[in-house]
C-alpha cells in the first residue's frame, strides 16, 4: 500500500492521546467501563476480541457491563473510568502529526499513514450517495499509548486494542496493537492491515451516523445482531478498500495487501479465536462471526463500493453467503 506523494494531508481530526475529542462537556457515560481482561492464550485474537467486546458494550446503549471473554478469560476493570478531565492519563501524546504534510510523509511514517488513511476514508464516505445529508466525519482519531480517557466510554488501556466510542464519535488506536498482529501474520508490507482495522472502526462510525448501532438487540450467537454489526463493519471496510486506489491519497493497494487484510480478518474470527484459546468452538457465544464470514463480508464490500445496501447484514438470511 502506497500513498500519493503529492497529496496534502489534513491533520485536523488526528491527534495524540493528549488532546483531541477529550474536551469537557461530553460527559454522560460517567461510570466505570469494565473491560474483559483475560488473555487466556495471549495472542492477537484475544486482544482483538476484547476490543470488539468493548465496542459492543458501547454500541448497545445498555451501559457499562462485563462481558465474558469467549476464551474463558476473567473479567477485570481497567482504570477508574472517571470522565471529565481535560487530558489523557499517563499514556500521553504519541504522535507528531504536525509533521504529516504530504503523502510522501505517509509513505515514510506510520503515524502519518494513519492521517492519510483517515483523509481517504473521510473522502470516500463523504461522497457516498447513500449518506447524502447524513455524513459527518468522525470527531477524531486518537493515537495513544498506555491509557486514554474517552469522551463517554470511560478509560481504556492498550490491551483493549483499537475501538470506536460512539458517544464522542472518536476512534482510539494504540499502534503497539499492530505489532502483535504483524508478528502473527509474518507479513512484510503491513500498512494495509492498519488500514483494514481503521476502515473497520470507521465503519462503526458510519453505523453510528445511520442509527444501525441502535438496532442491536441480541448480543451473542451466530445470527445475533452483534455479529451482524461486526460483519457489516467488515463489509464497509471492503467498500473503502475497493474505492481507495487512485482517490488522490492512495495510489496502490496490491493483491498482496488484500490477502494480508484477509489474513487479519481470519485471525479475528470467533471460531479461530475460540479454538486458539480453548480448543473448542461454541457458536452460541459468537459476537463477531466466524473467520469465513468475516472474510466473506469483507470481500462482499470489495465488490460493492458504490452502495451500502449489499452490506446489509441485518437483512441477510444466511450470513455464510453475503
Ligand atoms: Zn468492530
Image (spheres, rainbow, N blue to C red):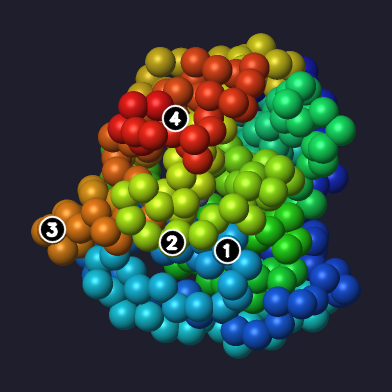
Give the secondary structure at mark 1.
loop
Front label number (1 vs 3) = 1
Q: Are marks 1 and 4 in contact (CB under 8 Å)?
A: no
Q: Earlier in the sequence, mark 3 or mark 2?
A: 2
Classify 161 as above or below 87: above
> Is residue 139 visible from the viewing direction of this image?
yes
Residue drawn at x 51%, y 47% as measured from the top left: 229
Residue drawn at x 62%, y 67% as measured from the top left: 61
- The location of residue 76, given as percent across then percent down, is 42, 83
Pick the residue in front: 165 or 143.
165
Front label number (1 vs 4) = 1
- Residue matched to label 1: 60
- Residue matched to label 3: 280
Residue 21, image quadrant: bottom right
Between the C-alphas of marks 3 and 2, the distance is 20 Å
Q: Is residue 229 left or right of residue 15?
A: left
Pick the residue in front: 192 or 208.
208
- The location of residue 47, given as percent across then percent down, is 38, 60
Q: Quadrant of the C terminus?
A: top left
Q: Is residue 149 left or right of residue 289?
A: right
Residue 298: numbered disc: 4
Amino acid at each position: 500500500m502506497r500513498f500519493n506523494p503529492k497529496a496534502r494531508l489534513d491533520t485536523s481530526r488526528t491527534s495524540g492521546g493528549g488532546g483531541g475529542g477529550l474536551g469537557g462537556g461530553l460527559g454522560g457515560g460517567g461510570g466505570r467501563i469494565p473491560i474483559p481482561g483475560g488473555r487466556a492464550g495471549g495472542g492477537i485474537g484475544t486482544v482483538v476480541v476484547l476490543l470488539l467486546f468493548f465496542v459492543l458494550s458501547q454500541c448497545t446503549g445498555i451501559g457499562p457491563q462485563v462481558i465474558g471473554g469467549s476464551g474463558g478469560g476473567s473479567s477485570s476493570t481497567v482504570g477508574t473510568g472517571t470522565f471529565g478531565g481535560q487530558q489523557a492519563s499517563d499514556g500521553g501524546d504519541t504522535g507528531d502529526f504536525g509533521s504529516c504534510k504530504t503523502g510522501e510523509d505517509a509513505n515514510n511514517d506510520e503515524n502519518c499513514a494513519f492521517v492519510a488513511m483517515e483523509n481517504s476514508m473521510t473522502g470516500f464516505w463523504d461522497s457516498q450517495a447513500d449518506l447524502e445529508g447524513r455524513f459527518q466525519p468522525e470527531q477524531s482519531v486518537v493515537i495513544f499509548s498506555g491509557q486514554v480517557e474517552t469522551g463517554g466510554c470511560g478509560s481504556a488501556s492498550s490491551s483493549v486494542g483499537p475501538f470506536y466510542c460512539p458517544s464522542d464519535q472518536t476512534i482510539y488506536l494504540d499502534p503497539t496493537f499492530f505489532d502483535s498482529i504483524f508478528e502473527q501474520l509474518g507479513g512484510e508490507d503491513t500498512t494495509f492491515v492498519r488500514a483494514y482495522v481503521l476502515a473497520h472502526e470507521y465503519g462503526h462510525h458510519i453505523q453510528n451516523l445511520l442509527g444501525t448501532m441502535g438496532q442491536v438487540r441480541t448480543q451473542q450467537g451466530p445470527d445475533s445482531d452483534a455479529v451482524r454489526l461486526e460483519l457489516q463493519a467488515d463489509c464497509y471496510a471492503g467498500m473503502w478498500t475497493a474505492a481507495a486506489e487512485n482517490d488522490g491519497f492512495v495510489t496502490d493497494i496490491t493483491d498482496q495487501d488484500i490477502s494480508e487484510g484477509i489474513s487479519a480478518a481470519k485471525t479475528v474470527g470467533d471460531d479461530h479465536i475460540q479454538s486458539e484459546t480453548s480448543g473448542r468452538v461454541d457458536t452460541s457465544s459468537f459476537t463477531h462471526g466466524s473467520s469465513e464470514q468475516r472474510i466473506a463480508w469483507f470481500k462482499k464490500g470489495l465488490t460493492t463500493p458504490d452502495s451500502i445496501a449489499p452490506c446489509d447484514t441485518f437483512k441477510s438470511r444466511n450470513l455464510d453467503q453475503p
